[in-house]
Amino acid sequence: MSLKTKRTLVDCFGEIQDTRIERHKKYSLLEIITLVVCGGICGCEGWEDFVLFGRCKIKFFRRILPYCQGIPSKSMLHRVMSGIDPKAFESCFGEWVKLITAEVSNRNRREELPKKF
Protein backbone atom coordinates (compact mmCIF):
# COMPACT_ATOMS: atom_id res chain seq x y z
CA MET A 1 0.00 0.00 0.00
CA SER A 2 1.54 3.32 -1.00
CA LEU A 3 1.61 6.39 1.22
CA LYS A 4 -0.95 8.06 -1.05
CA THR A 5 -3.55 5.34 -0.45
CA LYS A 6 -3.06 5.30 3.33
CA ARG A 7 -5.28 7.70 5.19
CA THR A 8 -5.26 6.80 8.88
CA LEU A 9 -3.15 5.49 11.73
CA VAL A 10 -4.96 2.16 11.35
CA ASP A 11 -4.04 2.02 7.65
CA CYS A 12 -0.38 2.77 8.35
CA PHE A 13 -0.02 0.24 11.16
CA GLY A 14 -2.12 -2.47 9.49
CA GLU A 15 1.02 -4.07 8.05
CA ILE A 16 2.59 -4.88 11.44
CA GLN A 17 2.80 -8.62 12.01
CA ASP A 18 0.90 -10.01 14.98
CA THR A 19 3.02 -12.84 16.37
CA ARG A 20 0.52 -13.93 19.03
CA ILE A 21 -1.18 -17.32 18.99
CA GLU A 22 -4.71 -16.93 17.60
CA ARG A 23 -6.46 -18.09 20.77
CA HIS A 24 -4.57 -15.42 22.76
CA LYS A 25 -5.89 -12.52 20.69
CA LYS A 26 -8.52 -11.05 23.02
CA TYR A 27 -7.62 -7.56 21.75
CA SER A 28 -6.74 -6.76 18.17
CA LEU A 29 -3.18 -5.65 17.49
CA LEU A 30 -4.49 -2.44 15.93
CA GLU A 31 -6.50 -1.63 19.07
CA ILE A 32 -3.36 -1.98 21.16
CA ILE A 33 -1.16 -0.01 18.77
CA THR A 34 -3.74 2.76 18.42
CA LEU A 35 -3.99 3.09 22.20
CA VAL A 36 -0.20 3.15 22.62
CA VAL A 37 0.45 5.67 19.83
CA CYS A 38 -2.31 8.04 20.97
CA GLY A 39 -1.36 7.64 24.62
CA GLY A 40 2.30 8.27 23.87
CA ILE A 41 1.45 11.46 22.00
CA CYS A 42 -0.67 12.58 24.95
CA GLY A 43 2.11 12.01 27.48
CA CYS A 44 1.60 8.49 28.84
CA GLU A 45 4.86 7.26 30.30
CA GLY A 46 4.10 3.82 31.71
CA TRP A 47 1.70 0.97 30.97
CA GLU A 48 -0.59 2.04 33.84
CA ASP A 49 -0.84 5.50 32.24
CA PHE A 50 -1.91 3.92 28.93
CA VAL A 51 -4.61 1.87 30.65
CA LEU A 52 -5.98 4.88 32.53
CA PHE A 53 -5.83 7.02 29.38
CA GLY A 54 -7.64 4.35 27.37
CA ARG A 55 -10.38 3.96 29.97
CA CYS A 56 -10.91 7.72 30.12
CA LYS A 57 -11.04 7.99 26.32
CA ILE A 58 -12.85 4.75 25.47
CA LYS A 59 -15.65 6.57 23.60
CA PHE A 60 -13.06 8.22 21.37
CA PHE A 61 -11.24 4.94 20.71
CA ARG A 62 -14.50 3.18 19.85
CA ARG A 63 -15.05 5.73 17.06
CA ILE A 64 -11.89 4.29 15.46
CA LEU A 65 -12.01 0.57 16.34
CA PRO A 66 -14.53 -1.63 18.22
CA TYR A 67 -12.64 -2.21 21.51
CA CYS A 68 -15.30 -4.86 22.26
CA GLN A 69 -13.26 -6.18 25.19
CA GLY A 70 -12.53 -2.71 26.54
CA ILE A 71 -8.99 -1.53 27.25
CA PRO A 72 -6.22 -4.11 27.70
CA SER A 73 -4.40 -4.48 31.03
CA LYS A 74 -0.92 -3.08 31.57
CA SER A 75 0.59 -6.57 31.38
CA MET A 76 -1.23 -7.27 28.10
CA LEU A 77 0.01 -3.98 26.60
CA HIS A 78 3.56 -4.76 27.69
CA ARG A 79 3.48 -8.33 26.36
CA VAL A 80 2.02 -7.40 22.98
CA MET A 81 4.18 -4.33 22.40
CA SER A 82 7.29 -6.32 23.38
CA GLY A 83 6.50 -8.79 20.59
CA ILE A 84 6.36 -6.16 17.84
CA ASP A 85 9.38 -5.75 15.58
CA PRO A 86 10.77 -2.30 16.53
CA LYS A 87 11.97 -1.56 12.99
CA ALA A 88 8.54 -2.35 11.54
CA PHE A 89 6.89 -0.15 14.17
CA GLU A 90 9.35 2.67 13.45
CA SER A 91 8.70 2.39 9.72
CA CYS A 92 4.91 2.48 10.15
CA PHE A 93 5.12 5.37 12.61
CA GLY A 94 7.34 7.30 10.17
CA GLU A 95 4.82 6.76 7.35
CA TRP A 96 2.00 7.95 9.58
CA VAL A 97 3.91 11.10 10.59
CA LYS A 98 4.66 11.86 6.92
CA LEU A 99 0.97 11.44 6.12
CA ILE A 100 -0.07 13.82 8.90
CA THR A 101 2.61 16.34 7.98
CA ALA A 102 1.48 16.36 4.35
CA GLU A 103 -2.18 16.66 5.37
CA VAL A 104 -1.52 19.58 7.71
CA SER A 105 0.65 21.26 5.11
CA ASN A 106 -2.09 20.89 2.46
CA ARG A 107 -4.73 22.27 4.85
CA ASN A 108 -2.58 25.25 5.72
CA ARG A 109 -2.10 26.05 2.02
CA ARG A 110 -5.86 25.88 1.39
CA GLU A 111 -6.64 28.09 4.37
CA GLU A 112 -4.17 30.85 3.56
CA LEU A 113 -5.86 34.11 2.76
CA PRO A 114 -4.65 36.24 -0.12
CA LYS A 115 -2.37 39.02 1.06
CA LYS A 116 -3.76 42.51 0.65
CA PHE A 117 -1.50 45.26 -0.64
Image (cartoon, rainbow, N blue to C red):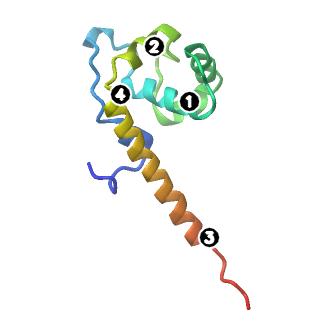
Is label 2 in contact with label 4 (beta carbons under 8 Å)?
no
Q: Of helix, strand and loop, which one carries label 1?
A: helix
Badge 3 crowding class, 10 Å Cα cut-off, few under 14, some 14 to 19, many 20 or more, is few
Relative to 85, residue 114 above or below = below
The quarter of the picture where residue 82 lies is top left
**Residue at (62, 18) in percent of width and height:** 49
The residue that mark 4 highlights is 86
In front: 6, or 91? 91
Is label 3 in contact with label 4 (beta carbons under 8 Å)?
no
**Residue at (29, 22) in percent of width and height:** 18
Circle 4: residue type:
Pro
The residue that mark 1 highlights is 40
Is label 1 in contact with label 4 (beta carbons under 8 Å)?
no
Q: Of helix, strand and loop, which one carries label 4?
A: helix
Q: Of helix, strand and loop, which one carries label 3?
A: helix
Badge 2 crowding class, 10 Å Cα cut-off, few under 14, some 14 to 19, many 20 or more, is some
Between marks 1 and 4, how big is the CA–CA gap?
A: 15 Å
Circle 1: residue type:
Gly
Farthest-out residue, right: 117
Between marks 2 and 1, how big is the CA–CA gap?
A: 14 Å
The residue that mark 2 highlights is 78
Badge 1 crowding class, 10 Å Cα cut-off, few under 14, some 14 to 19, many 20 or more, is some
In front: 64, or 48? 48
Per the rendering, the mark at residue 111 is 3
Farthest-out residue, front: 87
Circle 2: residue type:
His
